Image (cartoon, rainbow, N blue to C red):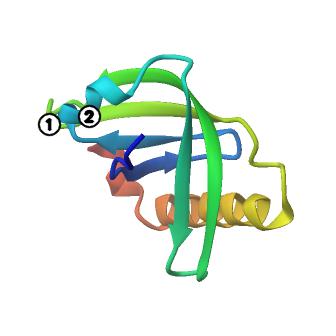
Amino acid sequence: DDPCPATLVDISEGGARVAVAPRADALFQLDKIVQMELSSNVFDIAATLHGIIRTILPTADDVYLSIGLQFADHQADEATRQLVHRLTGLQDRYLQTHPADLDD
């Protein structure tokens, strides 16, 4: 399959939520395993993860599709585990310093 650009919306130790263009909806099916290239310019790290699609919903503004992924193999190697842990920590710190964002 061809790559589909996505924006990381949320990440946790167990999975992620990404937003994709609606025209990509034919590429996604519930319970399908997809490959996700996850990178961070902050940490100069990249990893390939596999996720199982658990949810497919339109975003609130109906502009994108919100895809909920459950990580299937992120514990496989130390570098991938560290990247997920660091990105999760960054998100937590951002929410602590920008609590107004939660009201949107």
Instruction: Looking at the picture, tell me which residue is in the foreground, 4 or 97.
Output: 4
**The disc label shown at residue 81, or none:** none
Tell me the residue at 60%/63% (across/down): 87
Left or right: residue 103 versus residue 22 is: right
Left or right: residue 17 versus residue 77 is: left
Residue most extreme to the front: 1
Tell me the residue at 72%/60% (across/down): 85
Image quarter hosting the C terminus: top left
Instruction: Looking at the picture, tell me which residue is in the foreground, 89 or 48.
Output: 48
Disc 2 is placed on an element classified as: helix
What's the residue type where badge 2 is placed?
A: Ala
Disc 1 is placed on an element classified as: loop
Instruction: Looking at the picture, tell me which residue is in the foreground, 37 or 95.
Output: 37
Figure check: 8 above or below 31? below
Front disc: 1 or 2? 2
**The disc label shown at residue 63, or none:** 1
Where residue 91 appears, as percent x and y from the top left, is 53, 60
Left or right: residue 9 versus residue 64 is: right
- Residue 35 visible: yes
Tally the marks.
2
Q: CA distance from mark 1 to mark 2?
A: 12 Å
Residue under label 2: 24
Where residue 29 appears, as percent x and y from the top left, is 43, 19
Tell me the residue at 54%/60% (across/down): 38
Where residue 70 appears, as percent x and y from the top left, is 62, 32
What's the residue type where badge 1 is placed?
A: Val
